[in-house]
Each structure stands twice: as structure tokens, then as C-alpha cells.
Amino acid sequence: MKSKSWQLLVIVTVLAATGCSDNNNGHALKEDVPSGADLKAQVKGSMDPAPDAILLRYLNEELRAGVEGKSRETYRLLSNKDREAISEEEYLLQSTKGDQHISPELIAAMMQAVSYEVTSSTIEGSVAMLEVEMSLPILSASLSAQLRKTVTPELEQKVIAYLQSPERQVKKNTSSYKLVKEKEGWRVFLDLGTKKKIDTLVADAEELVPSLSMLGPIEGSVLESMKSNLLSAEAKYKDALSLGDDWRAKSNLKYLGEQIQKLRFYEGNKDRVAITNISVGEGLYGGVGVFGEVKNNSDVALSKVGITIYFLDKSGNPVHEKSYHPVYVTEKSHGSDAVPLKPNYSRRFGVKADDAPHEWSKKVKVVLSDLAQ
């Protein structure tokens, strides 16, 4: 299993992908950061650690915990409301573990190379809002790639030398944090209850419409059969975003919206495209083919018209099918293929049927399967 220290190396090198060579003016996140009662009180008249001291401890433990930033130590620094929303066991199950080990020397170098600075702190009653600027070292693409594979002693020494060099580059990230004052003192509030609701909504939506990134080439007729799931998934993504920001919901909703728009165009125009003069016969260069015409009775030019040809047996049952686009305009189209089908225009088509099975009775059924403007 990869140690948490290995995951710390990953988070430091992966998060800091680009940046500048500014010097770090904040506080280094060190191994000896005080915890609990050892933290000095910074609020006059109080023996409790101040919000920025608690946040420092949380950030330090989060880095130690790895990519997911979750450990028993970080869990104990969360607000009661967060801990009520998710059990410690469930919280820890979200941690990422692996199988590589790195030396204490490299761990120390990484911790020293990361710095932070609280740039803004506002306390109103039992709520504190803090902004933290973190400086993360940037490794070269080749060095980062090597670290993701195998960590050798020689590679560790290269990384340590770079991390300790004044020439190292850093990237600065600014994050906002909310802390709440509770009986035990200041605690980090992540609103895990809301995040859990968002995760559930996103998971439900993904179950309704799996492999969303693969929806691009799906035809209008297939989208029509998925309509109920598409609309339900859209509603769940919107509900998730109404609760808070989520990159998965945003990304999936974008793709889903494109498919729903495509579906609505198909539904609104499918009855305005006629497929006529269907016949089965010998082609110009020999061989059996299916021939016909498509006519655009809509009021918009069509860049794509897709059909499905069903080859029927003597009983009228399909024994084979073939998809074809009489109209399909793309950036690579040329000649007559590059011309959309204008309103009131027709276009002939012919499709070879040499691969039809012997059960085929030379009868076909041709239906519209796709449309695009």
C-alpha cells in the first residue's frame, strides 16, 4: 500500500502544475506543528487556540493524509455538524492509499517546501472566515512522471535537492475556509452534509445516464428512447448545483444539455422529413441495393439525416439492419456531400444490401433515426 507520505508527494507535485518563482513568505508546514492544548491562544482573554491556529493544524494534517486529505486527525478537527453528517469510518473510507514508500528525509523536504499565509481573517461571533494562500513547489513534467512510477534513492535525492534549492518554482493557490466556535473550540466547517447530498444526487444521475461522455454519437431515435432518464438526470444535476458548486454536475450537465437539445430538435422535426420511393433492385454497378429518397418538409436546412433500414423475412420480421446517412455534412465533406438538405429539397440514396442474410425476402422497412440542423 502506498504510504500517506507518498500521497503527500503526489498532492504537492500534481496540484502545483504551473506557477512562478516567487519566494515563499508564509509559514512552512513543519513536522513539529503544535496541536491541541499546545497551541498558544491568540484571542485575548481566551485559552483556546485561535481560528488560524486550528486551521494551520488542519491544513498540516490534511497534507500528511494524502491526496484525499482525510485522516483521523483531520476528522477530529471538523465541526460537530460535519461529523454528524458522516461517520469517521465512512470518512476514512474515502482516503486514497497506495504501495510506495519514501524516506523521512524526502517527507521533511516536502513539508518544508510547502508554505502558507493567512491573507484574510474575519470573526463574527461564533463564525470565522479565513483565506489562505498556499505556495506549492512545481516539479518538471519529466520528474513528476518519474515520481508517479517508482521512487528510487537516486530520484529522491534529486527531488530533495530541488525542493531545498532557492531556485525552485512555486505555484500559489488561494482557498477560503469557514470555522465555527464550538464547545471544544474552533473547528473547520466543510458542510459535509450538503456535499453528501450533492454526491447522492450526482450518483443517482450517473446511474440514470451512465457513460455520459459517450453520448455524442447517439442518434436522435435512441435519445428519444432515453428521454425519461435524460430529463430525470438533468433535474438531479440541477438540484445538485442548487446546493453548491460541483465540477461533476457542471460537466455532465453541459453534455447532457447538448443531448437534450439534440433530442428536442429530433422530436420537433422528425415528422417533417419524409422517406419515399423505397425500392429494392440491382445497383448501377451490379449487386442488390435499397433505394429511396428523403425530403425535407421542415423550415430549416438539415446537416444530418440518418435512416435505419430493416431487412425483413417472409413473415415481416427483421433479420438484419443497416444504418445510413443520406445527408451528413461535416468539416471534411466535399462536393455534393458538403451541401445541407434545404427546406422542400429531396435527396436520393442507395445502400448496398450484399451482406443481407439468406432469410431476407427482398422486403425492407426504412425509418428515420437521426436529424441535425
Image (spheres, helix red, strand yellow):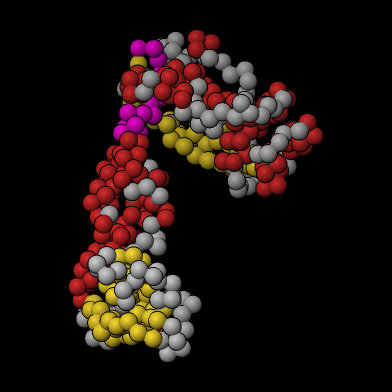
> Which residue: 63% across, 33% down?
9
Asked whether 293 falls inside the magenta stretch, the response is no
Residue at 36 percent across and 55 percent down: it is 254
Q: Quadrant of residue 236?
A: top left
Residue 116: image location, x then y, percent: 56, 32
Residue 359 at x, y percent in the picture = 35, 68
Q: Is residue 347 above or below residue 137?
A: below
Q: Which residues are magenta?
A: 183-197
User: In the figure, is residue 51 to the left or right of 277?
Assistant: right
Q: How many marks?
A: 0
Q: Nearer the viewer, residue 181 or 370?
A: 370
Q: Is residue 339 visible?
A: no
In the current view of this chain or complex, which residue is farthest to the right?
154
Q: Residue at x 40, y 15 (%)?
A: 185
Q: Is residue 184 magenta?
A: yes
Quadrant housing residue 150: top right
Residue appearing at x 35%, y 16% in the figure: 182
Determine the residue located farthest toward the bottom in the rendered image. Answer: 284
Location of residue 299 in the rendering, given as x and y in whole percent from the top left corner: 22, 80
Where's the N terminus, which quadrant? top right
Q: Nearer the viewer, residue 132 or 41?
A: 132
